[in-house]
Amino acid sequence: MKLRITITGPKVHDVGYRPWLVELAMSMGLKGFDVYNDEEDGQQMVIALIEADDRRVQRFLSNVNEKRPSLAKVGNITSGDYSDEVMPLWQTAAMNAYGQMNKAIPILQAIEDNTGLIPQMAKNTEKILEEVKGLRDEVQPGLGEQLRQMQADIRALKDRTGML
């Protein structure tokens, strides 16, 4: 059995939907599987093409309807029969892995380029903590005097009202 599943919504791209679907397909041992992003009338779409026995197709569709990546905002999920070729699952998984690595490499490079900021941030943190401690030392004597005065006032009020 072959099926086309269309997932539409305001945020179904760049939320890990394709890797999530590939992992689901692999866990279910689907024979054929392909997934890609599309867009129509300003609406984001993820298209999944699956090929497997009827039972697995229904289980896959049930999972897609019940679960999704945590950052996804889905508006609608539709499905229908599909008659064209479906790529082998292993091939889709390999292509998807390369696509995800291409997204991750610039992020990892930026992290590596900015590692020099970490010692600078630590130095600034120490400076800020010293300033806060200095302010606390300046403020505490005044607060202590105010607190003692409040306690004395409370005792005096209790004495007058007979609450002691």
Image: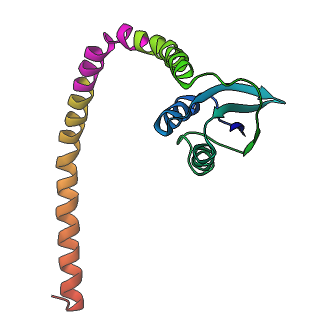
Residue 158 lies in magenta, yes or no? no
Corner quadrant of residue 43: top right
Q: Main secondary structure of the magenta part?
A: helix
- Most foreground residue, 32 or 146: 32
Q: Residue farthest to the right?
A: 41
The spot of residue 144 in percent (x, y) is 17, 55
Residue at point 28%, 15% (across, down): 120
Which color scheme does this rendered protein use? rainbow
- Most foreground residue, 136 or 44: 44
- For residue 109, above or below residue 44: above
Is 57 positioned to the left or the right of 126 in the image?
Answer: right
Corner quadrant of residue 8: top right
Corner quadrant of residue 2: top right
Is 33 positioned to the left or the right of 76 in the image?
Answer: left
The spot of residue 4 in percent (x, y) is 72, 35
User: What is the magenta range?
Assistant: 110-126
Residue at point 61%, 41% (across, down): 53
Residue at point 61%, 37% (across, down): 52
For the N terminus, give its image quadrant.
Answer: top right
- Most foreground residue, 36 or 151: 36
Is 16 positioned to the left or the right of 47 in the image?
Answer: left
Residue at point 59%, 48% (across, down): 55
Residue 117 lies in magenta, yes or no? yes
The spot of residue 106 in percent (x, y) is 48, 11
